[in-house]
Image (tube, rainbow, N blue to C red):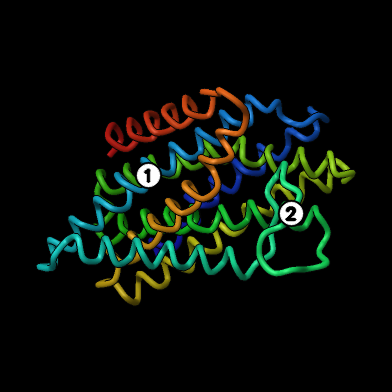
Amino acid sequence: MQPILWALTGTGFTFLMTSLGSAMVFFFQKRVHPAMQRIFLGFAAGVMIAASVWSLLIPAIEMAGENGGIGWIPAAGGFVLGIAFLMLMDALLPHLHPDEVVPEGPKTNWKRTTLLIMAVTLHNIPEGMAVGLSFALAAQEGGSGVGLSAAMALALGMGIQNFPEGAAISLPLRQEGMRPAKAFLWGSLSGIVEPIFGLLVVLAAGSLEPLMPWLLSFAAGAMMFVVVEELIPEAHLGEHSKTGTLGVMAGFLIMMILDVALG
Protein backbone atom coordinates (compact mmCIF):
# COMPACT_ATOMS: atom_id res chain seq x y z
CA MET A 1 0.00 0.00 0.00
CA GLN A 2 2.88 2.37 0.77
CA PRO A 3 4.29 2.33 -2.82
CA ILE A 4 0.83 3.18 -4.17
CA LEU A 5 0.37 6.10 -1.78
CA TRP A 6 3.83 7.45 -2.48
CA ALA A 7 3.40 7.12 -6.24
CA LEU A 8 0.02 8.85 -6.12
CA THR A 9 1.55 11.66 -4.06
CA GLY A 10 4.45 12.14 -6.49
CA THR A 11 2.36 11.98 -9.67
CA GLY A 12 -0.35 14.02 -7.98
CA PHE A 13 2.21 16.79 -7.49
CA THR A 14 3.24 16.72 -11.17
CA PHE A 15 -0.44 16.77 -12.16
CA LEU A 16 -0.99 19.76 -9.86
CA MET A 17 1.87 21.63 -11.54
CA THR A 18 0.31 20.96 -14.95
CA SER A 19 -2.95 22.40 -13.63
CA LEU A 20 -1.21 25.48 -12.23
CA GLY A 21 0.45 26.03 -15.59
CA SER A 22 -2.89 25.65 -17.35
CA ALA A 23 -4.31 28.34 -15.05
CA MET A 24 -2.14 30.89 -16.88
CA VAL A 25 -4.96 31.03 -19.42
CA PHE A 26 -6.86 33.21 -16.93
CA PHE A 27 -4.05 35.78 -16.87
CA PHE A 28 -2.78 35.76 -20.46
CA GLN A 29 -4.96 35.63 -23.53
CA LYS A 30 -2.13 35.65 -26.03
CA ARG A 31 0.07 32.72 -26.90
CA VAL A 32 3.47 32.34 -25.32
CA HIS A 33 6.15 34.27 -27.21
CA PRO A 34 7.98 31.93 -29.63
CA ALA A 35 11.33 32.53 -27.88
CA MET A 36 9.83 31.64 -24.49
CA GLN A 37 8.13 28.62 -26.03
CA ARG A 38 11.48 27.37 -27.29
CA ILE A 39 13.01 27.87 -23.86
CA PHE A 40 10.18 25.93 -22.19
CA LEU A 41 10.41 23.07 -24.67
CA GLY A 42 14.19 22.93 -24.36
CA PHE A 43 13.97 23.01 -20.57
CA ALA A 44 11.51 20.09 -20.57
CA ALA A 45 13.85 18.15 -22.87
CA GLY A 46 16.85 18.76 -20.61
CA VAL A 47 14.96 17.66 -17.51
CA MET A 48 13.77 14.48 -19.20
CA ILE A 49 17.24 13.59 -20.52
CA ALA A 50 18.83 13.97 -17.08
CA ALA A 51 15.96 12.10 -15.40
CA SER A 52 16.27 9.24 -17.90
CA VAL A 53 19.94 8.78 -17.02
CA TRP A 54 20.23 9.48 -13.29
CA SER A 55 16.74 8.52 -12.07
CA LEU A 56 15.97 5.57 -14.35
CA LEU A 57 18.82 3.97 -16.33
CA ILE A 58 21.54 4.08 -13.66
CA PRO A 59 19.23 2.64 -10.94
CA ALA A 60 18.09 -0.04 -13.42
CA ILE A 61 21.68 -1.08 -14.17
CA GLU A 62 22.62 -1.09 -10.47
CA MET A 63 19.54 -3.09 -9.48
CA ALA A 64 20.13 -5.71 -12.18
CA GLY A 65 23.74 -6.07 -11.02
CA GLU A 66 22.69 -6.46 -7.38
CA ASN A 67 20.32 -9.24 -8.45
CA GLY A 68 23.19 -11.12 -10.09
CA GLY A 69 22.34 -10.21 -13.66
CA ILE A 70 24.12 -8.32 -16.41
CA GLY A 71 23.25 -4.68 -15.87
CA TRP A 72 23.14 -3.47 -19.43
CA ILE A 73 20.74 -6.17 -20.69
CA PRO A 74 17.55 -4.99 -18.94
CA ALA A 75 18.67 -1.38 -19.39
CA ALA A 76 19.03 -1.76 -23.16
CA GLY A 77 16.05 -4.10 -23.54
CA GLY A 78 13.66 -1.96 -21.54
CA PHE A 79 14.92 1.17 -23.30
CA VAL A 80 14.11 -0.31 -26.72
CA LEU A 81 10.68 -1.49 -25.56
CA GLY A 82 9.89 2.00 -24.25
CA ILE A 83 10.77 3.50 -27.61
CA ALA A 84 8.63 0.91 -29.39
CA PHE A 85 5.69 1.63 -27.07
CA LEU A 86 5.76 5.38 -27.76
CA MET A 87 6.18 4.78 -31.49
CA LEU A 88 3.10 2.55 -31.39
CA MET A 89 1.08 5.14 -29.43
CA ASP A 90 2.27 7.83 -31.83
CA ALA A 91 1.04 5.78 -34.78
CA LEU A 92 -2.30 4.69 -33.28
CA LEU A 93 -3.50 7.94 -31.68
CA PRO A 94 -4.27 10.99 -33.84
CA HIS A 95 -2.61 14.13 -32.45
CA LEU A 96 -1.49 17.59 -33.48
CA HIS A 97 1.40 19.62 -32.12
CA PRO A 98 1.10 23.39 -31.59
CA ASP A 99 2.11 25.50 -34.61
CA GLU A 100 1.58 22.54 -36.93
CA VAL A 101 -1.17 22.14 -39.50
CA VAL A 102 -1.12 18.47 -40.48
CA PRO A 103 -2.05 15.99 -37.70
CA GLU A 104 -0.02 12.85 -37.06
CA GLY A 105 -1.41 9.34 -36.75
CA PRO A 106 -4.54 7.89 -38.38
CA LYS A 107 -6.90 10.16 -40.27
CA THR A 108 -9.77 11.34 -38.12
CA ASN A 109 -12.53 13.93 -37.98
CA TRP A 110 -11.55 14.99 -34.46
CA LYS A 111 -11.47 18.72 -33.82
CA ARG A 112 -8.14 20.54 -33.86
CA THR A 113 -8.45 21.25 -30.13
CA THR A 114 -8.85 17.53 -29.38
CA LEU A 115 -5.77 16.73 -31.43
CA LEU A 116 -3.75 19.35 -29.55
CA ILE A 117 -4.77 17.82 -26.22
CA MET A 118 -3.82 14.34 -27.40
CA ALA A 119 -0.30 15.50 -28.31
CA VAL A 120 0.47 16.72 -24.79
CA THR A 121 -1.26 13.73 -23.22
CA LEU A 122 1.10 11.38 -25.09
CA HIS A 123 4.08 13.28 -23.65
CA ASN A 124 2.79 12.91 -20.11
CA ILE A 125 2.51 9.11 -20.17
CA PRO A 126 6.23 8.32 -19.75
CA GLU A 127 6.60 11.11 -17.18
CA GLY A 128 3.94 9.53 -14.98
CA MET A 129 5.55 6.12 -15.38
CA ALA A 130 8.97 7.49 -14.40
CA VAL A 131 7.75 9.23 -11.23
CA GLY A 132 5.56 6.30 -10.18
CA LEU A 133 8.40 3.79 -10.63
CA SER A 134 10.84 5.96 -8.69
CA PHE A 135 8.53 6.03 -5.68
CA ALA A 136 7.85 2.30 -6.02
CA LEU A 137 11.61 1.68 -6.02
CA ALA A 138 12.03 3.83 -2.92
CA ALA A 139 9.29 1.86 -1.14
CA GLN A 140 10.88 -1.47 -2.14
CA GLU A 141 14.13 -0.29 -0.57
CA GLY A 142 12.32 0.25 2.70
CA GLY A 143 11.79 3.95 2.31
CA SER A 144 15.48 4.74 2.81
CA GLY A 145 16.41 8.40 2.75
CA VAL A 146 18.44 8.08 -0.45
CA GLY A 147 15.77 6.32 -2.51
CA LEU A 148 12.97 8.56 -1.31
CA SER A 149 15.01 11.72 -1.84
CA ALA A 150 15.83 10.62 -5.40
CA ALA A 151 12.12 10.01 -6.12
CA MET A 152 11.22 13.40 -4.66
CA ALA A 153 13.90 15.07 -6.78
CA LEU A 154 12.47 13.45 -9.90
CA ALA A 155 8.93 14.51 -9.01
CA LEU A 156 10.14 18.06 -8.34
CA GLY A 157 12.01 18.23 -11.65
CA MET A 158 9.04 16.86 -13.61
CA GLY A 159 6.70 19.23 -11.79
CA ILE A 160 8.85 22.25 -12.65
CA GLN A 161 8.79 21.42 -16.35
CA ASN A 162 5.07 20.57 -16.24
CA PHE A 163 4.19 24.14 -15.29
CA PRO A 164 5.11 25.69 -18.66
CA GLU A 165 3.80 22.56 -20.39
CA GLY A 166 0.35 23.20 -18.90
CA ALA A 167 0.42 26.78 -20.19
CA ALA A 168 1.63 25.53 -23.57
CA ILE A 169 -1.60 23.57 -24.02
CA SER A 170 -4.21 25.86 -22.40
CA LEU A 171 -3.11 29.06 -24.19
CA PRO A 172 -3.24 27.55 -27.71
CA LEU A 173 -6.66 26.11 -26.87
CA ARG A 174 -7.76 29.62 -25.90
CA GLN A 175 -6.43 30.89 -29.22
CA GLU A 176 -8.49 28.24 -30.99
CA GLY A 177 -11.62 29.91 -29.59
CA MET A 178 -12.17 27.83 -26.45
CA ARG A 179 -13.44 29.63 -23.35
CA PRO A 180 -10.78 30.20 -20.63
CA ALA A 181 -12.44 27.88 -18.11
CA LYS A 182 -12.74 25.08 -20.63
CA ALA A 183 -9.17 25.61 -21.89
CA PHE A 184 -7.95 25.38 -18.28
CA LEU A 185 -9.95 22.20 -17.70
CA TRP A 186 -8.61 20.43 -20.77
CA GLY A 187 -5.09 21.67 -20.15
CA SER A 188 -5.27 20.21 -16.65
CA LEU A 189 -6.79 16.94 -17.79
CA SER A 190 -3.95 16.43 -20.27
CA GLY A 191 -1.83 15.68 -17.19
CA ILE A 192 -4.25 13.22 -15.57
CA VAL A 193 -2.51 10.35 -17.38
CA GLU A 194 0.50 10.88 -15.09
CA PRO A 195 -1.14 9.56 -11.89
CA ILE A 196 -3.01 6.93 -13.92
CA PHE A 197 0.08 5.46 -15.59
CA GLY A 198 2.14 6.04 -12.45
CA LEU A 199 -0.29 3.87 -10.51
CA LEU A 200 -0.42 1.21 -13.24
CA VAL A 201 3.35 0.71 -13.33
CA VAL A 202 3.53 0.62 -9.52
CA LEU A 203 0.95 -2.15 -9.48
CA ALA A 204 2.94 -3.99 -12.15
CA ALA A 205 6.20 -3.49 -10.27
CA GLY A 206 4.65 -4.80 -7.06
CA SER A 207 3.60 -8.07 -8.67
CA LEU A 208 6.65 -8.37 -10.96
CA GLU A 209 9.47 -7.09 -8.77
CA PRO A 210 12.25 -8.85 -10.76
CA LEU A 211 11.16 -6.81 -13.79
CA MET A 212 11.76 -3.47 -12.06
CA PRO A 213 15.01 -2.79 -14.01
CA TRP A 214 13.11 -3.42 -17.25
CA LEU A 215 10.28 -1.09 -16.20
CA LEU A 216 12.66 1.70 -15.20
CA SER A 217 14.46 1.43 -18.54
CA PHE A 218 11.13 1.23 -20.35
CA ALA A 219 10.15 4.62 -18.90
CA ALA A 220 13.56 6.03 -19.85
CA GLY A 221 13.22 4.87 -23.46
CA ALA A 222 9.72 6.31 -23.74
CA MET A 223 10.88 9.67 -22.37
CA MET A 224 13.91 9.83 -24.64
CA PHE A 225 11.69 9.13 -27.64
CA VAL A 226 9.56 12.15 -26.74
CA VAL A 227 12.68 14.28 -26.28
CA VAL A 228 14.32 13.39 -29.61
CA GLU A 229 11.16 13.09 -31.71
CA GLU A 230 9.27 16.11 -30.45
CA LEU A 231 10.78 18.43 -27.85
CA ILE A 232 14.25 19.15 -29.22
CA PRO A 233 13.10 19.71 -32.84
CA GLU A 234 10.30 22.03 -31.65
CA ALA A 235 12.72 23.86 -29.34
CA HIS A 236 14.86 24.80 -32.33
CA LEU A 237 12.22 26.23 -34.62
CA GLY A 238 13.39 29.57 -35.99
CA GLU A 239 16.59 30.70 -37.65
CA HIS A 240 19.86 31.01 -35.75
CA SER A 241 18.15 30.53 -32.40
CA LYS A 242 20.08 29.29 -29.40
CA THR A 243 17.25 29.83 -26.91
CA GLY A 244 16.10 26.23 -27.26
CA THR A 245 19.66 24.94 -26.78
CA LEU A 246 20.12 27.03 -23.64
CA GLY A 247 16.79 25.73 -22.37
CA VAL A 248 17.99 22.13 -22.82
CA MET A 249 21.24 22.89 -20.98
CA ALA A 250 19.40 24.61 -18.11
CA GLY A 251 16.88 21.80 -17.72
CA PHE A 252 19.59 19.13 -17.77
CA LEU A 253 21.71 21.04 -15.24
CA ILE A 254 18.86 21.64 -12.80
CA MET A 255 17.60 18.04 -12.95
CA MET A 256 21.13 16.70 -12.53
CA ILE A 257 21.72 18.92 -9.49
CA LEU A 258 18.38 17.92 -7.96
CA ASP A 259 19.04 14.23 -8.46
CA VAL A 260 22.63 14.26 -7.18
CA ALA A 261 22.07 16.72 -4.33
CA LEU A 262 18.86 15.18 -3.04
CA GLY A 263 19.67 11.58 -3.99
Q: Residues within 10 Å of mark 2 (few under 14, many from 20)?
A: few
Outermost front residue: 239
| Residue 132 visible in the current orientation | yes
Residue displayed at 45% across by 59% down: 129
Q: Quadrant of the N terminus?
A: bottom left
Q: Nearer the viewer, residue 124 or 261?
A: 124
In-image side of 184 versus 213 (left or right): right
Q: Earlier in the sequence, mark 1 or mark 2?
A: 1
Residue 83 position, x and y percent, is 43, 62
| Residue 6 visible in the current orientation | no
Count of marks overlaid on the render: 2
- Distance, label 1 to label 2, CA atoms, is 31 Å
Residue displayed at 66% across by 37% down: 21
* Residue position marked by numbered label 1 in the rendering: 51
Residue 67 position, x and y percent, is 14, 67
Outermost left residue: 68
Q: Nearer the viewer, residue 164 or 258?
A: 164
- When the figure is inspected, residue 223 is found, relative to residue 2, above or below; the finding is above
Mark in front: 1 vs 2: 2
Q: Quadrant of the C terminus?
A: top left
Q: Residues within 10 Å of mark 1 (few under 14, many from 20)?
A: many
* Residue position marked by numbered label 2 in the rendering: 102
Kind of residue sitting beneath label 1: Ala
